[in-house]
Each structure stands twice: as C-alpha cells, then as structure tokens.
Amino acid sequence: MKNKSRGFTLVEIMLAGVMAGVFLTFCTQFFLTQLNQYYLISGNNKLSEQLRTLSKYMEKDVHNSLEFYVFPDLTSALSFTYASTTFPQVGNCLLLIQEQGMIAGGRGVIYYVGSECNSGTKLAYYPLYRALVTFSAQKKIVETASVLNQLVVGHLKKATSSHVQLYSTTSPDASGIFYSTERRRFYGSADYYPHIAGCRHGLYVGTTLMQPGLKLKVTETPCNFCFYSRNPRF
C-alpha cells in the first residue's frame, strides 16, 4: 500500500488568508471602538468630577461670604481697595470677602480666569483658578499674582460670543463668566423703596466647562449656577 503526503493547495491558502484577515479586521475594529469609548467615558467622568468640585467650592464660598465683588480680571482685583461698587457687575474675576478685621484686616477667596493654554491637544482652553487671599489693615489684598496658591477648579471652553460667558480677553470689561446682582428692590413710580426682606446679593456663573482628553477627545458641558450670600446685611 502506497502512502501519499498531500499539502495545501493555493486556493486553500488564499481562503485561509482571507478568513484570517477578516478576523483580524473585526478584532482591530472592536479594539478601536472600545478604546474610543474608554477615552469618552474617562473624559466624561473627569468632567463630572470637575463640575462637582467647582459647584461645591463656589456654593460654600459664596454662602459664607460677607460680600463679593466682580472684576474684569485679576489685575483689577489685586489693585482694588474695596468700597462701594455699582451693580450689576460682570467679569472674569470674583473676590469674596469672608472675614474682616480678624487676620491682618481680613481674608477671602478669589476666583479668576487664567491665560489661554492647551494640554498638548492643540485645543485652547482657559483654566479657572481658586486661591485664598488676605487683606491689609487698609483692606487691600496682600498677595501678588506670582505668590497666589492656585487651585485649578475648571477648564473653560474658548468662546467667541455669548451673553455671560468668557469672551476674547481684548475686551474683558464687557464680558465675563461671573455676573453679580444686588438685592431685590421694589421700584415705584417716583420712589426707590428699601430692600425686600430675605433677599441677598446674588452671583450668577455662566460658562462652558470642558475636559481635554487623550487622542484629541474632548467633552464639554454648559455650566450655569446661581448662588446667594447668606449674610443678612449684604
């Protein structure tokens, strides 16, 4: 009896190659889809954490403030000796007075929008900083811009137009993410009546938060808050 050894034919090899290619293509597509979902979910989780962090900090700081002021930018706030101001105010810097006459004239919290930057994704954004400040006996901020202990509490999307949102820094006096309103009042035909009992000065925050991610994946969400001071005299 004769034994015959039979190899693969060209057709069988080609068929096996095609099947292997289809399988590898399916695996690659599945992997890329899952990787893309990972980038998006990771960005969404970080954005949600950022939104919670910002809202909790601002809620606590505004509620505990004795008074607050809004400025076009950080430079205006650092050179400010606080006195009477007009309302409403709009800008990219918020100063909250929390203690007066306790530590070198008092202390407070400042929020301000930093310079435009990016995280290697070629997508520009603005960092939102929070920092503690102290006041001299003359009620002027002691710290300078270079010594502020900055805490990033948000990444702001670069906006070109909106009602109360970060505009181009070429005209900061006409735009901003912070908008302060005075206590509610009655307006009569001839008289300007006193404040309504129970109403406080309010602060509106309107902007768009974004979270730069891997592979140019970016998530964003509108951010609209309104807080009121608990100080009955403010």
Image (cartoon, rainbow, N blue to C red):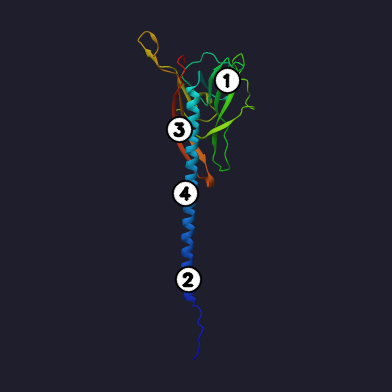
Q: Amino acid at mark 4?
A: Gln
Which residue is labeled 3 in the image? 223
Q: Residue furthest left?
A: 189
Asked whether 195 or 101 is in front, the reply is 101
Q: Residue furthest bottom?
A: 1
Label 3 sits on a secondary structure element that is strand
Q: Please say if 123 is above or below 130.
A: below
**CA–CA distance in space, label 2 to label 1:** 75 Å
User: For the residue carrying disc 1, how many other residues have a C-alpha within 10 Å: few (<14), some (14-19), or many (20+)?
Assistant: many
Numbered disc in front, either 3 or 1? 1
Q: How many marks?
A: 4
**CA–CA distance in space, label 3 to label 4:** 24 Å
**CA–CA distance in space, label 1 to label 4:** 45 Å
**CA–CA distance in space, label 2 to label 3:** 55 Å
**CA–CA distance in space, label 4 to label 2:** 32 Å
Which residue is labeled 1 in the image? 107
Q: Residue at x 53, y 20 (%)?
A: 98
User: For the residue carrying disc 3, how many other residues have a C-alpha within 10 Å: few (<14), some (14-19), or many (20+)?
Assistant: some
- Whichever of labels 4 and 2 marks the residue nearer the N terminus, that label is 2
Q: Amino acid at mark 2?
A: Ala
User: For the residue carrying disc 2, how many other residues have a C-alpha within 10 Å: few (<14), some (14-19), or many (20+)?
Assistant: few
Label 1 sits on a secondary structure element that is strand
Numbered disc in front, either 2 or 1? 1
Which residue is labeled 2 in the image? 16
Label 2 sits on a secondary structure element that is helix
Q: Residue at x 49, y 43 (%)?
A: 43
| Image position, residue 61 (x, y; %) | 50, 25
Q: Residue at x 49, y 54 (%)?
A: 32
Q: Residue furthest top?
A: 190
In the rendered structure, find residue 37 and report the number of the disc placed on it. 4
**Tags 2 and 1 in contact by the CB under 8 Å rule?**
no
Numbered disc in front, either 1 or 4? 1
